[in-house]
Image: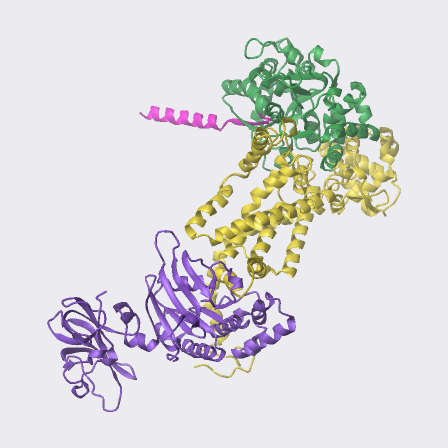
Chain colours: A purple, B green, C yellow
Amino acid sequence: MNASRPDSTPDAAFVEFDRVQKSYDGETLVVKDLNLTIARGEFLTMLGPSGSGKTTCLMMLAGFETATHGEIRLAGRPINQVPPHKRGIGMVFQNYALFPHMSVGENLAFPLEVRGMRRAERAAKVARALDMVQMGAFANRRPAQLSGGQQQRIALARALVFDPELVLMDEPLGALDKQLREHMQFEIKALHDRLGITVVYVTHDQGEALTMSDRIAVFNDGRIQQLAPPAELYERPKNSFVAQFIGENNKLPGIIEAFDDKKALVRLATGEVIDATPVNIRARGQQTLVSIRPERVEFKPEMMPPGVHRIAADVLEVVYMGDIFRTRMRVAGSEDFVMKCRNTIGQRRLTPGERIEIAWHPEDARALDPM
Amino acid sequence: MKKILTLSTALSAVGLAASAQEVTVMSWGGAYTVSQVEAYHKPFTAETGIKVVSVDADNPATPIKAMVEAGNVTVDVADVEYADSIRLCDEGLLEEIDPSILPPAPDGTPATEDFLPGALTDCAVASIVFSTVYAYDTTKFPEGPTTMADFFDLEKFPGKRGMRKGAKANLEMALMADGVPADEVYATLETDEGIDRAFAMLDKIKDDTVWWEAGAQPPQLLADGEVAMTTAYNGRIFAAQVAEGKPFQIVWDGQVYEYDLFVIPKGAPNLENALEFIKFATDTQRLADQAKWISYGPARKSSGALVGLYQDGKTEMAPHMPTSAENLTNALASSYEFWVDRDSELNERFNAWLAV
Amino acid sequence: MLAMDATGADAGRGGLTTADGKPLKQALATAQSRARRRALLLVLPLLAFIVITFVVPIGQLLFRSVYNDGFSANMPQISAWFRETEPGTEPDEAAYAALAADLAAAAEARSVGVVGTRVNYEMSGTRSLFTAAGRKAGDLKPPFREALLELNGTWGDPQLWGVMRSVSSAYSANFYLAALDLARDANGDIVRAPEGRRIYGMLFLRTLWLSALITGLCLILAYPVAHLLATLPLAKSNLLMILVLLPFWTSLLVRTTSWMVLLQEQGVVNNTMVALGLIGEDGRIQMMYNRTGTIIAMTHILLPFMILPLYSVMRPINPGYVRAARSLGATSWTAFRRVYLPQTLPGIGAGALLVFILAVGYYITPALVGGASGQLISNLIAYHMQDSLNWSLAAALAALLLAGVLILYWLYDRLIGIDKLKLG
């Protein structure tokens, strides 16, 4: 991960959304007051459920939708009025959008041809782009003769062949099976690092987002909920939506008993008190939702930090998943509290019906807004 | 009880037999069919109980061949033009009709003598004499055209013309308009030069002519203002004039008159009824009655005297008949001999001329 | 167990067998025969329907175009004489005797008109020759040559004898010659028909040209409509689709006559233009009873046949293609020309072929609104079917039309490929 990249400062800004709003029907806003700055060379992912406004943002950037309000700038230049074909942005579409009536080579030559490039130069560039995605032997095939993964590579090559500085990708791996998808994630990431291009990537798959991005903008309800590098997003979600959307999470509703900067005491519905880190807590007695990652829950006393509150748990189900055990428990009235333990040598195997005590580091339990 | 049952069974049997009795008559539609329905069909049904089914065609002669050859004859009696009746008869597509079965005149004159000359042939019995004339809208031409030549004179009488889509009557009229006397028309048409001359005359108005096919069209074209003058069957114009009060005027100069005849397609499903119908419809009184409804002359001499007023009770029919003396000053009797033989050839040429 | 010896071609001994030793092929056939029989039973009604309503009538039509026994069936003796003698033989007394006997018999059987009509197709003005001779044939006395020549000198005309020889066989290609504006002269050589009679070639060309024009107009009008239908949300496009299909639910006659109401000289369009002062009372435009009327009315009537295939091809085209092209640097025109248009070609091909073939055979509309200059070849076919009753010529014309359409279809297959045809 390239989390060490300098955070966007105005002079490093390559793509800027400045107070952008978008409405299709004049009644509701699909994108609400979006401010986003993307640095040159950055890999930024827009992540969110469908209808969250992320694709609309991408389309506005590509020029297929016009912003209802606000300004979008590319390399400092406002592009609201620039038609798509003059923006010079490469784009990879959800279903690849390879032209079915053209061969792979013709598909790749298309952007060069419309730019008036000479034939010989074109051929050289196409060959280079195909080699880049290891598809050099396929220039004469039709898209329909290729597998999904091969089509994906061609679409990628086509978006890159004319050397755009910015490449947009709209859920490009959505149609691939899991294994191929993971493989392509690495390839795309590698290409990004090698070519030094700026990528804006839209997906609803959080795994994908976490693997590839420098920064992730989590969208919901037309707003960016959190904009952060993957690790920060995963470990320090700013609100319940982000906490829930990224990774698996246990949620325990409760009321703030006491809190300071570092620690909050939360009384759960069943009366137990637990330790948590306050995130967006403003007052005592406030409703909260404590979120704890399943892999940060401990049941072996020697692993628990000293002085933390422990809580009783009834083991309901243990699922063997190879690398981990996934244990579902009843905790504070909630029946889907999950704990994940690595399948290490000497790991104690829990059995359903067993009653144990669990605890976690207060830093790993985050008291968030109750949604 | 048993008696009543037997009686009702017998009655229903009679009812069934009666309802099965019918005769299908095919004619030209519009005012002409109306006149036949009033003068023939209704009284025939009233007298014999035989139901008359009336169907229309642009020219009833044309479906007959198809029906007979396909062995699917649905028509018992058809009303056709002279040349068609001869042609169909020669090709064996019609039943023969023995003229001796036709009723004599009221004074006892046998039918063969009472009918006008040529009105009875091997397969056909004439009912009326009709005429192809031309008519114009008096509101467009208060000082109307009076001669056949005027019809072809676009300078003197500007405006669209209507003509029947076919060679017959058009060629004769063209020659008469070109100054050929009526009695020389067919002799002229026998020569290639004569035919060329007729087409040359038609050329003058070709670009301004709307071609009609059904007899009901010309009065409609005239009423819609689509044409300024049009050829038509005289009875159709009369019906529009008198029954609908249209400002139409017939020009009798250069009229071409001929018989309309009843024929029976070979293999007619109700042959007996068809013969009965023809016998009934062509008696002296019925033929005279038809003239109450439309201005076509009866084909029997004895009917002439019985023709009186139009059905409105005030219009004298005689002046509207093609056969009345003042309408015959420059008239032409259509020659079936000519058309039987030359019909296909001249129509072929006419179509070629029309299409170019 | 399968016997794995698959080397022999003989299924009984060398081939694969089933577990109980039956040849595998035979077992497969038994297993499938029931399903095959059932499938056959299911398609049988359709097959019978197609044969009865399509194959048989077209076969009859083709047969009739080369077969006309009007002369040969009714004039057996003279036909026999023609068979026995060489072409060009001077007719002798035996020939005249046979002719007189046939004429008498035909007159008796009321078929002399059929004979005359058949000869008249080849040589105009001869029909009454036969009917007149038929009436008097019974009274003729030998020598028959003199007797017939006395009736009418034409009986000695070598051309008449040449024609009679050619029609004495029921099979004849002469109807095709006539349909191509050709004829045979007295020597039997093929020559062009006289100037005033050449009509079919011109009408075939006019039919093809007008059909092509109408197809082009339909394409120009239908393409944007189909595109709109394909890109609108389904609810709206369904509504529009109903408007497109509405004419389908109206009788052809009603649609044609409503065009007459609109376009005639005293019609709605002319009245409106006069009322608006666009044209004067004398400048009313003739849009009906001529070629313009045929083109307007047929374009309207055939439009849905173009819209539907286009729509069915356009609907599944992902808007992403055009977007992709735009993002790759193409102007909207280039994106349309290079990316969208090529993908709609199967629909254009299908629609154009459909409209063209329908237009080539159109009959009612040109008959009603076409006047003289808007007539198409099918109107002449109808004329020969219904008015002149020359069915053989009608059949020959129709067969030529059919051949033309098939050639077109073949060309389409060669150029574009019939498998690329998409009707929806």
Where, quadrant-wise, is the N terminus of chain C in this rendering? bottom left
Q: Is residue B102 above or below residue C315?
A: above
Quadrant of the rendered image containing residue C100: top right
Give the x, y percent position of residue A54: 38, 64
Residue at x-position 32% and y-position 78%: A231
Q: Is residue B288 above or below residue A333?
A: above
> Over which residues does the magenta segment extend?
B1-29
Q: Is residue A205 magenta?
A: no
Residue at x-position 58% and y-position 67%: A110
Q: Nearer the viewer, residue A147 or C69?
A: A147
Give the x, y percent position of residue A304: 18, 85
Q: What's the magenta bit mostly, secondary-structure-wise? A: helix
Name the side, left or right, on which C111 lies relative to A39: right
Q: Is residue B3 magenta?
A: yes
Quadrant of the rendered image containing residue C74: top right
Residue at x-position 82% and y-position 45%: C191
Q: Is residue C45 above or below residue A114?
A: above
Residue B184 appears in the figure: yes
Name the side, left or right, on which A321 lies relative to C284: left
Q: Nearer the viewer, residue B207 or B354?
A: B207
Name the side, left or right, on which C182 lies relative to C22: right
